[in-house]
Image (tube, helix red, strand yellow):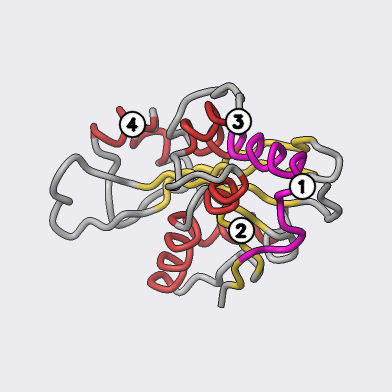
Amino acid sequence: MYHGGLVNIVDVEATCWDGERPPGAVSEIIEIGLTVVDPGAGERVSRHRILVRPTRSKVSAFCTELTGLTQAEVDTGLDFGAACRLLATTYEAGLRPWASWGDYDRKQFAHQCRVSGTPYPFGRHHTNAKAVFTEAYGLPKRPGMARALEIAGLPLEGRHHRGEDDAWNIAALVLRLAERGAWPRAGAVDVP
């Protein structure tokens, strides 16, 4: 059984396109889903959603179809720097270990912070929950989150590809791993 503290489970949605990216556009975070879990107690403690206003791209029709997010909705969000400050202060992102399904979220944050000059909000302890799940279940290849829920016998709650809902579902998988004694106490990856 896991014997650590709280863990932030993070899932981001970013601007995306079906096919070619429009000239000058870059993939930017538009939603940060965050679920705080207590693996030791086996519970999801809280659920959060931070909308982020993109500055160098627009939400495409494809992106809206995939995530349900619209340009009008994300226009009401915080700028990226403010979202990172909120993560650092309100959600103790720099102090708590954090996890995501795969490395995309970690890499997207690192890249967007680097190009925007925004301080990276997270601490050094990140766990790739997909890698831990794959090893714990002895799978030959890493499954997507929806498939992992099926394998673990858990329901998909909410809308897939919506950051808030995906973070909630990933949190359920993390808790299942903790029940099995497979969740690491500290992050599996140290991030610079």
In the rendered structure, the answer to whether residue 81 lies left or right of residue 53 reads right
Q: Which residue is mark 4?
A: 66
| In front: label 2 or label 4 | 2
Q: Residue at x 84, y 45 (%)?
A: 40
Q: Amino acid at mark 2?
A: Thr
Q: Residues within 10 Å of mark 3 (few under 14, many from 20)?
A: some
- What is the CA distance from the residue labelled 2 to the residue labelled 3? 19 Å
Q: Residues within 10 Å of mark 2 (few under 14, many from 20)?
A: many
Instruction: Tell me what residue is drawn at x 78 percent, y 45 percent.
Output: 39
The span from disc 3 to disc 4 (Cα, nearest Å) is 24 Å
* Residue drawn at point x = 57 percent, y = 51 percent: 135
| 134 displayed left or right of 172 | left
Q: Which residue is mark 2?
A: 127
Identify whether 122 is placed above or below 152.
Answer: below
The CA span between labels 4 and 1 is 34 Å
Q: Residue at the location (48% across, 52% down)? A: 102
Q: Which segment did they paint magenta?
A: 168-188
> Tag 1, which secondary structure?
loop
Q: Residue 181, labelled with which disc?
A: 1
Residue 152, numbered label: 3
Secondary structure under tag 3 reads helix
Mark 4 neighbour class, 10 Å CA radius: few under 14, some 14 to 19, many 20 or more: some
* Badge 3 or badge 4: first in the primary sequence: 4
